[in-house]
Amino acid sequence: MNKLLVIKIGGNIIDDETRLSSFLRDFAKIKDRKILVHGGGKLATDLSAKLGIAQKLVEGRRITDAETLKIVTMVYAGYINKNVVAGLQANHCNAIGLCGADGDAILAHKRNHPVVDYGFVGDIDRINTSLIKNLLEQNIAVVFAPITHDQQGQLLNTNADTIAQELAKGMSKEYDVSLIYSFEKSGVLLDAGDDSTVISKITAGYFQELKAQQKIFAGMIPKLDNAFAALNAGVKKVIIGKAEELNKLVSSQAGTAIVNE
Amino acid sequence: MNKLLVIKIGGNIIDDETRLSSFLRDFAKIKDRKILVHGGGKLATDLSAKLGIAQKLVEGRRITDAETLKIVTMVYAGYINKNVVAGLQANHCNAIGLCGADGDAILAHKRNHPVVDYGFVGDIDRINTSLIKNLLEQNIAVVFAPITHDQQGQLLNTNADTIAQELAKGMSKEYDVSLIYSFEKSGVLLDAGDDSTVISKITAGYFQELKAQQKIFAGMIPKLDNAFAALNAGVKKVIIGKAEELNKLVSSQAGTAIVNE
């Protein structure tokens, strides 16, 4: 099977024009088939504040009401997505920007939570692998905004990490998929305060060991649990590291690789 | 050659939720391959006003400055485009929403006018027919927002009528193209005040006659000049009529058909 990279970038890159343009240059250099999933960044929050739309929290959780959905659709699927695509085109990387409604790429349903009504938040039901494969095989990089739809005409705000994970899982029927989460640190660290203590490889066994010895930062555990869930669903490798080191992450020269064994 | 419809809807439909949802229902019913081009509507103007961004006019012409480009990218390529696509999906019409940067679909350059600097406004250089054909042949309707790019990373605000016309011309190498402009009247009228005086068919000869007899509303002449230019570039038929009568326009039971002979 051919190799496919599913790469998630966070808001810290999106918010910083210089870092974003450097990231897009690196992304364009990747020869393998590739998908980019971007999060939101501060732009949506800033726009809401300017328009006097208060962020709604219920029990400490963000709620996507109708006004907030409108803002994130504009900012994520419009401004950010189209500027990322235009930036890739400028780097001679043909790219197409989609949300989950486009080509019915990502079908979701409104979250049905017993206690909290999250509003227009989507939980993913399925990925349209044939559409995505068709684009990738035309040598087009697919850029996803974190918005899905429910096939009933409703757009839904959806966590970008989850979209990246579900895309990686879904596409693993067709490709050898590596899922790359770029974040602010160089990888999973033995000492959370020391960026030089990156663990280069974590297997399932080693993860249990690290947890038992409480050598791993608590906030990292759900991320790693998700990574192993992706591996168990067919993803070949999950890599966590710095966006600035994207090309090194791709060639296994930086970051933490999470593998089954 | 297979038939392709390129349909432009104006802001008056976009701004009216009931009329838009009825239009999308009708659009979904069309069996032929189809492209929808939407304009902007009042939403972008309203958002600019709320954010205190003044509309810039130079010699009575609207200028797209950086702030305005940001707004139209959010509203046209984000909010409107994605809601139109989600609405079509709800009507069991698979659709994909693109701007000109996506898949390098519509390449343009910043308008170079000897007197007026229009700002970030694009004039179209070429259409990526193979990408669009590939999507149409997967039975996906393509929905275009009126934003293009210059291959240098710059998005450009571009007139939706012109986008529809250039798409129709470009795709006429591959399909028998009908270009449909929906607007507020039932077609080209002999008496501008009487909607029952629709001219059902205008040939090039009849157009000259109507002009000579000054039987045609002056504002209609540039539209018809453009229509004949499209026909001369390979488009089979241009139809002008009411969005509410879309299915009748498609089956030649309403509106004005503009044909070479």
Image (tube, coloured by chain):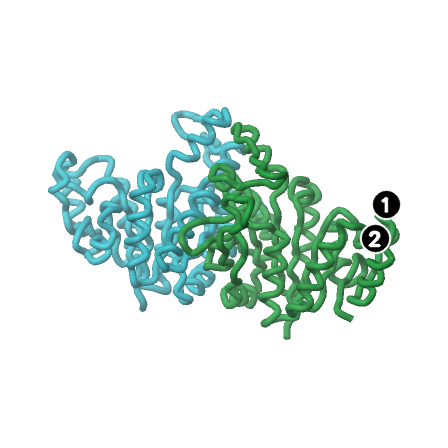
Chain colours: A green, B cyan
B154 shown above or below B260 = above
- Residue B150 visible somewhere in the drawing: no
| Mark carried by residue A193 | 1
Q: Position of residue A68 (x, y in %)?
A: 51, 38
Element on which disc 1 rests: loop
Q: Mark 2 packing: few (<14 Cα in 10 Å), some, or many (20+)?
A: many
Indicate left or right for B102 with B223 as reference.
right
Residue at the spot 59% in from the left edge and 61% down from the top edge: A167
Provide the chain ID for the residue under circle 1: A
Q: Position of residue B228 (x, y in %)?
A: 26, 50
Nearest the viewer among A92 and B207 is: A92
Indicate left or right for A260 with A67 as reference.
right
Circle 1: residue type: Gly
Q: Are marks 2 and 1 in contact (CB under 8 Å)?
A: yes
Indicate left or right for A92 with A19 as reference.
left
Residue assigned mark 2:
A189
When asked about the image quadrant of residue A123, the answer is bottom right
Element on which disc 2 rests: loop
Nearest the viewer among A43 and B212 is: A43
CA distance for labels 2 and 1: 8 Å
Provide the chain ID for the residue under circle 2: A
Q: Position of residue A220 (x, y in %)?
A: 76, 52
| Mark carried by residue B17 | none
- Residue B54 visible somewhere in the drawing: yes
